[in-house]
Amino acid sequence: MSSISARRAYPLLRSSLSSTKQPGSAYRIPFQSPNAILRPFSTTPIPSAYVNSNSKPAASTATPSRLASTPIKPKFTPTASEPPPETVRTSSVDESTRNLRSLTDGLDDTPVELNENAKQIDWTRSYHGLGNAAFSAEASQVLLAPIEPDDVEVKPDGIVYLPEIKYRRILNRAFGPGGWGLAPRGESIVTGKLITREYALVVQGRLVSIARGEMQYFDPDGIPTATEGCKSNALMRCCKDIGIASELWDPRFIRKFLSEKTKEVWVEHVTTKKKRKVVIRKDDVVKYPFKEVKM
């Protein structure tokens, strides 16, 4: 009996041992086909997840983009919703500015009309003494004397002229200081770039010549200076009628003077480096901002 029970106990013990191993096989992952959905995570460690302290970052081969050299302009300019409040100072300045007369609108210099019954000559309209008598021999000799070549100047474009002060000196030698004068015969006419006015040359109480002077200006602030230049231009034209420096209107004298007393040179502007040909006197030198160059 004991041997039989022992034989039966052995298979039971073997079956019990095999049953204890069965639960371990239940946790095995079954085989999945390639088309099956993979799990979103893995328990296997990935080598790339660990940082290698010996590794160095790869050098960047891309060149850094240049910063913009010009600042970005806003698309719109903000404007004030309301004008600034007026103050005592701004209101007074605006009022004084409105009361000023613009020089470009013309000069309010109309000659004063004299009383016709008064014993005065209105040189704005009168032609008193025009062509009445000739000057004295002494005065005529001074007026008709040839001009000195050293007194004649030349402009860079080749135009010869006599300085305005030389005309006044000749008049003073001929008639004496106070023996002559210029009388305006109308108001000044101001255009966009030119000012003009008519003047009369009065010598020893009688009208001698009438001429219109003109002068250019480039800025409204230069209009007062242009009025004086206009007066000098009229004096030069009036003196032509009484024989002062009449050679300057003679073409033969001009050609002879240019060939004997002047020369053409090339000059360069020291700042702009622009070159051009100018005419100067032979006894003169090129002045700043130009310098003479060789071509």
Image: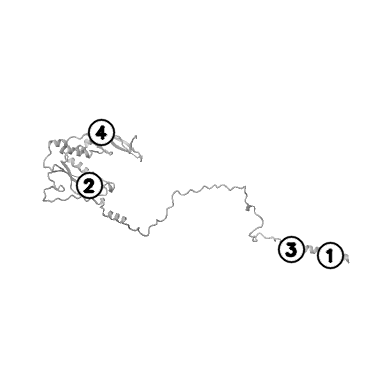
What's under tag 3, amino acid-wise? Pro
Residue 79 horizontal/vertical position (percent) = 38, 57
| Between discs 3 and 4, the one toward the N terminus | 3
Residue at the disc numbered 2 = 196
Q: Whole-Å distance between the Cαs marked 2 and 4?
A: 33 Å
Residue 256 is left or right of residue 61, and the answer is left
| Between discs 2 and 4, the one toward the N terminus | 2
Q: Residue 59, relative to residue 22: is it above or below?
A: above
Q: Nearer the viewer, mark 2 or mark 4?
A: 2
Q: Are marks 1 and 4 in contact (CB under 8 Å)?
A: no
What's under tag 2, amino acid-wise? Thr
Q: Nearer the viewer, mark 3 or mark 4?
A: 3
Tell me the tag on residue 261.
4
Q: Nearer the viewer, mark 1 or mark 4?
A: 1
Q: Whole-Å distance between the Cαs marked 1 and 2?
A: 148 Å
Residue at the disc numbered 3 = 23
| Between discs 3 and 2, the one toward the N terminus | 3
Q: Whole-Å distance between the Cαs marked 1 and 4?
A: 153 Å
Secondary structure beneath disc 2? strand
Residue 197 visible at all: yes
Residue at the disc numbered 1 = 9
What's under tag 1, amino acid-wise? Ala
| Between discs 1 and 2, the one toward the N terminus | 1
Secondary structure beneath disc 4? helix
